[in-house]
Amino acid sequence: MGYSGFEVQTPPPIADAHLRSLYDYWRALAQAAGGLPQVQAFDPLHLPKVLQHIWIVEIDSASHRFRVRLAGENINAIYGRNIGGQYFRDVYDPSDIDTIVARYGRCLSQPAIFRATGSVYAAAGRLTAGERLALPMLGRGGVTDTLLGATVYGGKVERQVDVLITGDVPEFFPVHAGNHKPPAIAGP
């Protein structure tokens, strides 16, 4: 783990312009930090057109479980409520949780950029195509325990009790960062 500095081994092939602007902003923050950026460096005013798609997920320091810290209005609309502050088990369909924890855990532990395309949501028997991006960041304690992400989708998703989100095609893009400190991660 003797790497110093910051490098994205292979940049993700991002199709959506909103996600590209988020990636470019994150990369600029990382280059300025000389490693993974701290979540406190994120200024939403730099991305006003992306805010409705943004979400921040973190590892709760006490329970080591994933929690949604913040979700933009398009993300909250999918669930029909504000999901900020809630643990994964309180938000996601039980059949999705292990997959989501494994994916996001890999992003934080390795670290890696996560990109998914395809059916980013399924509700009311309809699949909604889109693209999802998750970018590792340092949390308030200096550990890589926070993901800054966004999900964009086409068309309206009809709300139902359970929204499935893992019908997509995942890809991981390793990041080398001298300040990376892997988090302790528990289940949902």
Image (cartoon, helix red, strand yellow):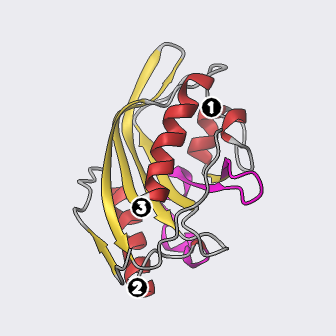
* Residue sitting at x 68%, y 48%: 65
Tag on residue 34? 2
Q: Which one is nearer the viewer's eye here, 161 or 60? A: 60
Q: At numbered mark 2, what does the secondary structure look like: helix, strand or loop?
A: loop
Residue 38 picture location, percent across and down: 55, 76
Q: Amino acid at mark 3?
A: Pro
For badge 1, the amino acid type reads: Tyr
Q: What is the CA distance from the residue labelled 2 to the residue labelled 1?
A: 35 Å
Q: Which residues are magenta?
A: 40-68
> For mark 2, does the 10 Å Cα neighbourhood hold few (<14), some (14 to 19), or many (20 or more) residues?
some
Measured Cα–Cα span from mark 1 to mark 3: 23 Å
Q: Secondary structure at mark 3?
A: loop
Is residue 84 rendered magenta in the image? no
42 falls in the magenta region: yes
Disc on the earlier residue, 2 or 1:
2
Gap in Å between the C-alphas at discs 2 and 3?
15 Å
Figure quadrant of residue 91: top right
N-terminal of the pair, mark 2 or mark 3, is: 2
Does label 1 or label 3 sit earlier along the sequence?
A: 1
Total number of numbered labels?
3
Marking on residue 92: 1
Whether 87 is drawn above or below 160: the answer is below
**In the rendered image, which quarter is residue 153 located in?**
top left
- Look at label 2 and name its amino acid: Gly
Which of the two marks, 2 or 1, is nearer to us in this view?
2
As drawn, the label of residue 1 is: none
| Tag of residue 111 | 3
Dot 1 surroundings within 10 Å: few (below 14), some, or many (20 or more)?
some
